[in-house]
Amino acid sequence: MKKNKIFGFLAVAATALLLVSCGKKSSTSSKTTTITVGASAVPHAQILKHVQPELKKEGVNLKIKVFQDYVLPNKALANGDIDANYFQHIPFLNQWNKKNKGNLIDAGAVHLEPISVFSKKYKNLKNLPKNATVLVSNNAPDYGRILTIFKDAGLITIKKGVDITSATFNDIASNPKHIQFKHSYEPKLMPQLYKNGEGDAVVINANYAVQSGLNPITQSVAIEKSNSPYKNIIAIRPSEKNNKAIKKLVKALQSKSTQSWITKHYKGAILPVKPVK
């Protein structure tokens, strides 16, 4: 009888010890926060993957969901399917919010993808002939960037008082060479149009250029200046403004080490924002 009592006591004690042990394990795992960030494959997802180990040390489990277009990432964010996204600049975000009655906000800038002009026929943008055809994507928020490149090259002028971040090709004041801007193409198709030799020049976003093996620095005939307002950002819902995991993500992306990695890895094709001190 005594033996049974002793065995019973030991069984209860073992069970209690096991429960305490499980409780400690659960407590430790609860300190890790998982966030899912939507991103374009290049360079955004690559940059996010670079900071994953650092974030893991900070208690953040970063999951990356890759998108192949500019349409779905904001929809997914607004619907709560992801916690943040990383693929767009502020003018794009502002236009998306206006068009979709959204309220997504900027949580911090990370890098600039200088949009560039490529040509298989001409070595300099100024050499474009009269009635030249320039192929442009249908991504309207980028039109101001393109107009600025052509304005800086002395090929066009822009109407006075126009906000360049919301400008369109209708805002061209003068176009002496009668350059024709055709803008009905999906952004991801632009590298292939260039490789096919279509048009006299093709404007390509850096992410798609790099993804297709093109180097904007060495192969383009004109490139956007580094003081551009079109820096790529982390976008979030307003409810996530004080999310500590999101703040850690932005801090890691803006860190001096990450910014240096961006410069070295993309060899100037992707430009980092000024490092946070």
Image: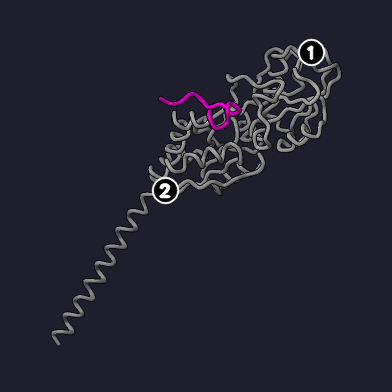
Q: Residue furthest bottom?
A: 1
Q: Quadrant of residue 126?
A: top right
Above/below status of 5 relative to 144: below
Query: On residue 10, which mark appears?
Result: none
Q: Quadrant of residue 113?
A: top right
Q: Is residue 28 left or right of residue 164?
A: left
For marks 2 and 1 on the same chain, the one whose residue lies earlier in the sequence? 2
Choose between 105 and 224: the one closer to the eye: 224
User: What's the amino acid at mark 2?
Assistant: Thr
User: What's the amino acid at mark 1?
Assistant: Ser
Residue 90 picture location, percent across and down: 58, 29
Residue 95 picture location, percent across and down: 64, 31
* Other residues around mark 1 within 10 Å, as few (<14) / some (14–19) / many (≥20): few
* Dominant secondary-structure state across the stretch colored magenta: loop
Secondary structure found at label 1? strand
Query: On residue 174, which mark appears?
Result: 1
At x 61%, y 28%, the residue is 269
Residue 41 picture location, percent across and down: 61, 41
Q: Are marks 2 and 1 in contact (CB under 8 Å)?
A: no
Query: On residue 33, which mark appears?
Result: 2
Above/below status of 20 relative to 241: below
Check if residue 105 falls in the magenta segment: no
Looking at the rendering, the stretch of residues picked out in magenta corresponds to 263-277
